Amino acid sequence: MTSPLEIRVRAGGGTRDYPVLLGPGLRHEIAALAARVAPSVRYWAVVSDETVAPLHAEGVATGLAQAGRRGDLVTFPPGEAEKTRDRWAAVTDTLLARGLGRDAGIVAVGGGVVGDLAGFVAATYMRGIPVLQIPTSLLAMIDASVGGKTAVDTPAGKNLVGAFHPPAAVVVDPEVIGTLPEVERRWGLAEAVKHGAILDEGYGEDTAVAARALLDGEPGAILQVVRRSVELKARVVSEDERETGLREILNFGHTVGHALEHASDFRIAHGAGVAMGMVWEASLGERMGVTEAGTAATIAGWLHALGLPTQPEPVDPVAFAAGLGVDKKARDGTPRVVLLARCGQVAPAPDGGWAHRVPSELVEALAPWPLG
């Protein structure tokens, strides 16, 4: 077996720590890796979407079956619109119909939607079974697959029903990025910019400088950016697994970003929403006197180098305002937003947390279209 790079993530107070394994070709070694990280699992169900399945998930299922671990393949249509309670129920019912029990586990092969949905199925099936995350999008590698968050969307907003369920392991194979269109790599890099904006200004700058290699999907460049993002995120989630404190900083750009996505009926991709949200939220911070002047422009420059949007696209204003009000950080319908002190440093909120209450009139003043 190839010796992969390993980054440890702390979970369950140290009782459920798990590895993020990075290395080219690791997707071909899943059976051996699964036996190492979850030896008690006798049968694996491989959950993927109908686009990723023929590219990667079918091979994973075949490898598990050849190793005597069954490898049932369960697929569903691609897209954020499928990350629902109805789809969670359908996947769960399929596993029940196939007779999988407490000795089973789930392998999630796909992007953020697959990881979130399959992870939530694993968190709730038989009161919780192991899940192995194999992210196939750059966004999922950099961010979504690490940290143990699982969820589905509701008509009220994104990720409002879910559970914390740490994976048995995350397996990152940078070779799969070559199968993605450039636009998908671009969306994933928005999360790398976020990690630079909140934790490491130099990393944000380096990501922008390496834009062409990253957008071309060069494995060495991809491995380097995934490694640094995972190291940064692992440091945060290991300290605050359930988002009761420091982990809240990872939501920078997401309050506005999620509201844009939801109000557009997910026409706006997650990476695009986060990119636009970061510039907007940095601008909010500057208006409030919390964020150093010029921070929003710096972040916009990083995003521009990567071909990411910086100005919000028009969406339904009522739906956008409603999305801000039901965000997980909101209190009494008042938006609460993670604000930067400057690039690479988040500003603590007056209440001791990390999300600042933002006057609705200020949000409306910054909107490029009327919210009323």
Image: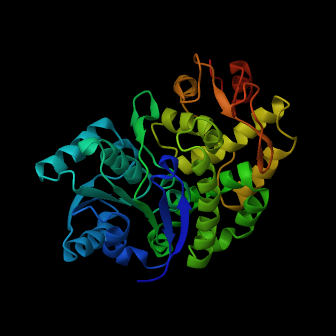
**Residue 83 locus on image (x, y percent):** 36, 43
Nearer to us in this view, 355 or 39: 39
Q: Is residue 262 left or right of residue 67?
A: right
In the image, residue 362 above or below residue 202 = above
Where is the N terminus found, in terms of image quarters? bottom left
In the image, residue 58 above or below residue 90 = below
- Render colour scheme: rainbow
**Residue 283 occupies which quadrant of the picture?**
top right
In the image, residue 272 above or below residue 182 = above
**Residue 318 occupies which quadrant of the picture?**
top right
Can residue 269 be seen? no
Q: Is residue 31 left or right of residue 97?
A: right
Nearer to us in this view, 102 or 283: 102
**Residue 10 locus on image (x, y percent):** 54, 54
- Count of all numbered marks drawn on residues in the image: 0
**Residue 7 locus on image (x, y percent):** 56, 65
Nearer to us in this view, 278 or 20: 20
Residue drawn where x is 56% and y is 73% of the image: 217
Can residue 302 be seen? yes
Where is the C terminus found, in terms of image quarters? top right
Residue drawn where x is 77% and y is 55% of the image: 301
Q: Residue furthest right?
A: 293
Residue drawn where x is 62% and y is 39% of the image: 248
**Residue 56 locus on image (x, y percent):** 34, 70
In the image, residue 291 above or below residue 27 = above
Nearer to us in this view, 114 or 129: 129
